[in-house]
Image: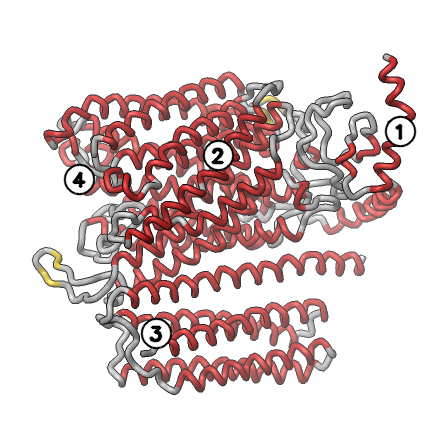
Amino acid sequence: MSTIAVHGHEVAHHGHDDHEHHHHDTFITKYIFSQDHKMIAKQFLITGITMAVIAMILSILFRIQLAYPEKTFPLLETLLGRFAPGGKLSPDFYLSLVTIHGTIMVFFVLTAGLSGTFSNLLIPLQVGARDMASPFLNMLSYWFFFIASVIMLSSFFVQKGPASGGWTIYPPLSALPKAMPGSGEGMTLWLISMICFVASSLMGGINYVSTVLNMRTKGMDLWKMPLTVWAFFLTAVLGVLAFPVLVAGVVLLIFDRSFGTSFYLSEIVVNGQVMPFEGGSPILFQHLFWFLGHPEVYIVIMPALGISSEVIATNSRKPIFGYHAMVYSLIGISVLSFIVWGHHMFVTGMNPFLGGVFMITTLIIAVPSAVKTFNYLATLWRGNIRFTPAMLFAIGLVSFFISGGLTGIFLGNAALDINLHDTYFVVAHFHLVMGSAAIFGMLSGVYHWFPKMFGRLMDEKLGYLHFWLTFIGAYLVFFPMHFMGLDGVPRRYYAFTEFKSMARWLSVNTFITWAAIMSALAQVAFLYNFIHSIFWGKKTTQNPWNSNTLEWTAPVEHIHGNWPGEIPTVYRWPYDYSKPGHDEDFIPQTVPFSQTMSSNLPHDFEDNEAGLEAQSKWDLANKPQEEVK
Amino acid sequence: MAQLQQDKDKLNLAPKKFNMWLFIFTSFMFFAALTSGFIVYSGGSTSRGIKIILPHAFMYSTGVIVVSSVTLFMASRAAKRLQFDKQRLFLWLTAVLGIAFFAIQIYGWSVLVKMGVYFVNPNASQSFIYVFTGMHLLHIIAGLGLIFNALSGSYKNIPQVRNLFRMEFASIFWHFIDIIWIYLYVFLLLNQY
C-alpha cells in the first residue's frame, strides 16, 4: 500500500509537468492519424462494419440470382449497369460477387475487423498497458488496412469487373490474365489489395504479441490474463506465422502472371491459343494457400471464442469453467491448425496415405474445440444468467459453433469428402462454424464493449430484435444448404437449377433468399442502434456489467495512456464472480486478497506462504462466529 | 525529469526490439514457405530439379556476407566501449560488404543466364534459384537501410541508449539475413543435382 502512496506523490508532481508538455490534439491527429489504440480500434470497427455491410449486400445480390434465375429486375440494371444487362446478373459478375463477398468477409471483416478492433481495444486495457508496443506501427496497420479496402472495392470500377476466381484464387484462373474477365485488372487489384492487407495484419499481429509479452502490468502473469487476451495473443501468433506463407504463394503467382514463369502453370490452351507455360504445378499454390488458409479460419474464430468466454462468464456471474482447459485448448487449436491444411485438398489427387494423415489431425482438432464448447455450457449451467444482447450473441456463437462444428467431422473424412467436396454442404458448414459464429462473437463484443469504446450504452430492445432476427435468419439460410449439398449441388454455380436433376431446389433457393433478406434487414436495427447510440445513447457508468477485468477500472472518458496516474496492479484472476463469502458477486482483478478475507480460499495462496498464514489466523478468529450465526 | 524521460525511453525500446524478433519469425516463415514450395514442386516429377552446378559467385558472396557479420559485430562492440570512430569505420565496412554481396549476387544471376538457366523456365526449380536470391536481396536492401540508420545516428551523436538500440536493431536483422542466406545456399547446394 505504501508504495502506491509514494507513487501517487510522484504522479502529482509529474502531472504538473505533463501539463506543460501537453500537446493539443488537432482533428487530424485525434481522429485520423491517431496513434491511440482506442481510436485505432474504433477506426477498425467502423471500417470493418462498412465492409461487412458491403459484403452482405453483395451476397443478397447473388442470392437474388439464385432464387430467380429466370426473372429480370430492371432495377438491377439501373444499379449495376453493364454487370446486369437487361436486369439480370451476368454470369461473370455473379462469380465476382461470390469471390469478393468471400474475400471481404474472411479477411476484411472477420480478420481485420474482428482482431483489429478488439485486440487493439482490449489488449492494452486488459493487460494494463498505456498503449501498444509501437503505436506508430499500429497506426500504419490501420492505414494499410484502409488502403487495402479501398483498392479491393475499387476493382468494381474497372471495365471487366473484380476478381472472380473464388476467394482462394487458385491458378490457372488467377494466373492467366486472359482466362476470364475477372482474371484481368480485377485480379491484379485483388493481389495488390491483399499485399497491403497482409502488411497490415503483420504489423498489427507483431504489435499484439509484443504488447502481451512485454507490457503487462504488475501482477499480471500469464495465468491471470483474461481469456480474451489469450485468444487475441494466440491469434496474432497464428497470423505472424501463417501470413508470410500466403505472401510467398502470392509472390510466385505474381511472377507467373506478370513475368511468364511456370511455377503454377502447366501446358494450357486459352481461347484456342497455346500458352507458353510448361511444367508448373497448380497444386503447389493450393499447398501454400491452405497453409495460410487453414490457420486463417482459426484466426477468424479464436478472437470470437475469446470474446464469448469473457461475455459468458461475466453474464453468467460465474467463473469460467475450466480456465486452464480453455487456454490449453486454444493452444492446442493453434498448434494443430498448422498440420491440417491438406483436408482442403483431399480430392486434388493427393496420396491416400497423406489424406489419411490429414484426416486424423483434422479429427483431433475436434477435441480442443469440443472442450471449449463443453466449458461454455458448463459455465452457463446454473449461473445467474443476465440476458444482455451481448450475452445472447455469445450464446448464439456457441450454438453455431456446435451445429457447424458437427458437420466438420463429416467433411474432415477423406472418403466422405469425395462426395461432399465443393458442394453446398461445405458452404453450410463454414458459414455456420466460422461465418456466423465469428460474426456473432464480433457483435457480442460490440454490444459488450460499446460503453468502453463510446462511453454510452446501446439500446437493449433493438439489440434483442437484432439478435433474434439474425439468429433465426442465419439458421434458415444455412441449414437447408446441408441437404442441397448432400444431394450433390455444387457451390459457386450461376444457375444450377437449370440442371434437371437439381431443378427441385429452386423453391429452397427462394426460401433461403428471403431468409437472407430478412437477416440483412435485421442489420438495419443494429446499424441504427450503433450510430444512434454513439451520439445519443444513455451515458454509461464506469463498470456497467459489474465486470472484473482491468478495462473497467479505466475512466469512461478516454485519455491517452488509459489510466490517470499509476497503472493498477493485479492481484487475482479475472473470473472471481459470485465467490462464496463475498458481499458482492464480483471481485475486480485489482482488489488484493487482504481486502477479501471472508471469501479467500486456500488455493488463492499457492505461492504465498505469508498470505496463507494470515488467512488461517483470520479464519480462526472470524469463521467460528459465522457458524454460530 | 530527464531521468524519468530516459526511463521512459528504455521502457519503450524493449518491446520495439521484441518487434524485430517477431518480424524475423515472419521472415523466416516466408523463406520456409518458399523452400517448402521448392521441395513440393521438385518432388513432383523427375524432370524437375536444379540440375546444374551453382555458379561459384554464390560461394564468394557467402564469404562476403559472413565477413560483414563479423565487422558488424566489431562495430557493436566498439559502440558499447564508446569508441565511436571505430564504430563508424566498421559500420562503413559492413555497408560496403553488404553492397558487394548485392553486386556478387547480381553477377551470379548473369552467370546463370550465360549458362542458359533463365528465370522464365519450364523447369521452375531453376526459377526458384532467382526467387530465393531475389527475395533475399530485398532483405539485404532493408538491412542496409538499418545499417545506414545506425550510421547516421552515430554521426548525429544521438544519446548512447538510442545509439546502442539502433546498433542492436540493425545487428539482429543483419545476422538473421546472413544466416538465412547460408540456409538458402546450403539448401540449394544440397539440391543442385
| Residue at the (49%, 84%) spot, across then down | B64
Which chain does tag 4 point to?
A: A
Label 2 residue SS: helix
Kind of residue at badge 2: Ala
Vertical placement of residue A135 versus B70, above or below: above
Q: Nearer the viewer, residue A234 or B173?
A: A234
- Where residue A427 sits, quadrant-wise, is top left
Label 2 vs label 3: CA separation? Answer: 45 Å
- Tell me, yes or no, whether dots 2 and 3 are on the same chain: no
Vertical placement of residue A571 versus B182, above or below: above
Of the numbered discs 4 and 1, the one sitting upstream in the chain is 4
Give the residue number, with chain letter if any, for mark 1.
A618
| Residue at the (58%, 71%) spot, across then down | B170
Q: Which of marks 2 and 3 is in front?
A: 2
The reply to whether the C-beta atoms of the residues labelled 4 and 1 are less than 8 Å apart is: no
Q: Residues within 10 Å of mark 4 (few under 14, many from 20)?
A: some
Of the numbered discs 1 and 2, the one sitting upstream in the chain is 2
- Where residue B103 sits, quadrant-wise, is bottom left
Q: In this view, does B20 lie to the left or right of B105?
A: right
Q: Is any atom of residue A257 visible in this view? A: no
Give the residue number, with chain letter if any, for mark 3.
B129
Label 3 vs label 4: CA separation? Answer: 41 Å
Give the residue number, with chain letter if any, for mark 4.
A91
Residue A177 placement (x, y as % from top left): 21, 56
| Residue at the (60%, 27%) spot, across then down | A456
Which chain does tag 3 point to?
A: B
